[in-house]
Amino acid sequence: GLVVFGRRWAIGSDDFVLPGAFELFVRLVWWIGILVLYTVHKGQFNCPGGGLLHSYLLGLLILLASIICALSALVYVSMQGTISNPGPRKSLPKILYTRLLLYFPEFIWAVVGAVWVSDNSVQCEKTVINGVIGTVIASWIIIVFTIIGVVIVFDPLGGKKTFYLPDGVSRNLESSQSGQLLYNVKSSATRVWEKRIRLLCCCIVQDDDHRVAFTSIAELFRNYFSDTDLVPSDIAAGLILLHQEQDKMENCPKEPEEVLCHSPSSLVTDDLDVELENAAHYMLFAAAAYGWPYYVYTNPYTALCKLNGDCCRNRPTDSDITGSDRHNFHFGSILKITGLQYRDFIHISFHNKIYEIPFFVALDHRKEAIVVAVRGTLSFEDILTDLSADCEDLTLEEVLENGFVHKGITQAASYIYRKLINDGILNQAFTIAPEYKLVIVGHSLGGGTASILAIMLRNSFPTLRCYAFSPPGGLLSKSLADYTKHFIVSVIVGKDLVARLSMPNMEDLKRRIVRIVANCNRPKYQILLRGCWYEVFGGDPDDFPTELDGRNQDALTQPLLAEESLMVHRSPSYNALEEESHLNSPPQYPHLYLPGKIIHIVEECSSRRLCSSDIKYTARWSNETVFSSILISPKMITDHMPDVVLKALNSLSQEHGSCLSC
């Protein structure tokens, strides 16, 4: 992070190349235009107000020339060095001070120009007046965008991160002094993150649960971001380098996605095909739980017309519907997606708060099942539930495999459990269809909630099955994950980010980013430009030279000086945080895993960035260790989307059906 005005900012000294070059281009065009305007009308300033106009244009030419020189120096110096070697850029703060000082005369000139343009007594040539108006507008636009940029890169904790002490000083502080310093910095960082979260969630009604969640999530972000000196562009460069590194590894004999396990119980291919057919069927219920947003997303041209035909119908009296469903759009979408009838629904809940997510219970006559479908993330409340990632014990009677679980998702599962059992919803369903089996499904947050709900209901319903589509990776401890292999099937597509998302995996990603960024010998702007070209147009991964080249294998296990600088050079309070928290307390975020047996669906595609529309998929039994590392890919988000999961399952199911018919 750049240190100017006595504080650290969320921008690096090498981040001025691209924005500086863009402004330099604008200023050059602007300067040439004013020069042409001044030269053409040089002898025509005898009009009323022309003398002031002449002085204004002349001063503007000088001011723009000064700004162009400052910007040229700023861009040139910012291009020097690498991310972890800012030494060649040590003169940049002085140039930046000079550039910022030039905003004062520019502001004055913008005011003078605005006053001159608004003066009705000025009767000069129309072209000149229009040129001055354009100049004034451009000046104010640049000033406003500069102010917005300063606000964006302002680091509220910057003042606490700039006071570095020599090595050993922080370790020799008195325990009471260092403890107080640690407490103050931790409290300040938590308050800053809490304010940011409250600002993002300003539109929702906040109660005690929200306040507890805000504090918990703020501490999570504070813990994650407090021990590195990286700015957002450094992280972007690291992700680009990691993606290209992973693509290069695909040519190796082994890659992370090929380290697969055949299934703990040696299941044959027929069992996989049966589970894929069931998963394709139940994914419709998991997708339907999203209601009208999913239906409109997958049918953008016809959805509203189809739903409007049903919006005026009365709600069914034999279904218990709670929560807001204005115009009957949610329930109408569920009917369209699942193909069920009104009478097939036992209970539908659209109620949504933190730790309380929508779900529905329906009769599936085709599979002879009572289906509990839980909705995934679709609101700010759901996001808060996702981010409440503390671990808590799951206490179950007569189950020896108790362990740690995701706190927020567990509370959501407990809410649905109370509704199903205490409100008699499942009793009502089994009264109607006593011979049916219980199946619990969900996607994303809904998949994680469905998995924990299945664990809670397992003793009462020994034959239940659960299908979790793209569930969060950090969900169950190893003992619970092994216990669920008997009744839960997880379905993951491609390089889905959420299925690999856990705090240990995020810490591993942070270390990988720091290492690859620190060891790259190219300047950041080259990494970003080449990376953008690679992501959009494809091609061969760039072979960036690194400080790792030429080092022996033993040396590779030791951190480099550049890498240490990004992880260790922080305020003494953050050093204390690192030392004290790990020695005296158990890990707050232990390793958590995906639930049940895992089906991994991989897209068969060429190395080209743009694939044909006829995509083929392959599915195989996988192991939770395959998802112990986050893979960087343009599809890491899209592979998680419910329509992509449903498309992949339908493709595999149809392929299996055509093989059987042949």
Image (cartoon, rainbow, N blue to C red):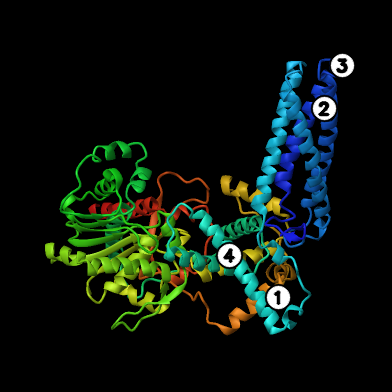
- N-terminal of the pair, mark 1 or mark 4, is 4
Could you classify mark 1 by the number of other residues whose Cα lies within 10 Å: few (under 14), some (14-19), or many (20 or more)?
few
Question: Residue 555: which disc?
Answer: 1
Where is residue 546? Give x, y as percent. 71, 62
Q: Secondary structure at mark 1?
A: helix
Could you classify mark 2 by the number of other residues whose Cα lies within 10 Å: few (under 14), some (14-19), or many (20 or more)?
many
Q: CA distance from mark 1 to mark 3?
A: 73 Å
Q: Choose top left, top right, bottom left or bottom right for residue 475.
A: bottom left
- N-terminal of the pair, mark 4 or mark 2, is 2
Name the mark nearer the viewer: 1 or 3.
3
Q: Secondary structure at mark 2?
A: helix
Question: Residue 43: which disc?
Answer: 3
Q: Secondary structure at mark 3?
A: loop
> In terms of depth relative to the viewer, which is nearer, 640 or 520?
640
Residue annotated with mark 2? 57
- Quarter in which the N terminus is drawn: bottom right
Name the mark nearer the viewer: 4 or 3.
4
Query: What amino acid type should be assigned to the residue bearing mark 3?
Result: Gly
- N-terminal of the pair, mark 2 or mark 1, is 2
Q: Are marks 2 and 1 in contact (CB under 8 Å)?
A: no
The residue lying at 54 percent from left, 65 percent from top is 218
Compared with residue 294, is residue 349 higher up or lower down, i.e. above or below? Answer: below
Q: Secondary structure at mark 4?
A: helix
Name the mark nearer the viewer: 1 or 4.
4
Residue annotated with mark 4? 191
> In terms of depth relative to the viewer, which is nearer, 632 or 442?
442
Where is residue 579? Give x, y as percent. 64, 79
Where is residue 650? Give x, y as percent. 32, 52
- N-terminal of the pair, mark 4 or mark 3, is 3
> In terms of depth relative to the viewer, which is nearer, 611 or 528?
528
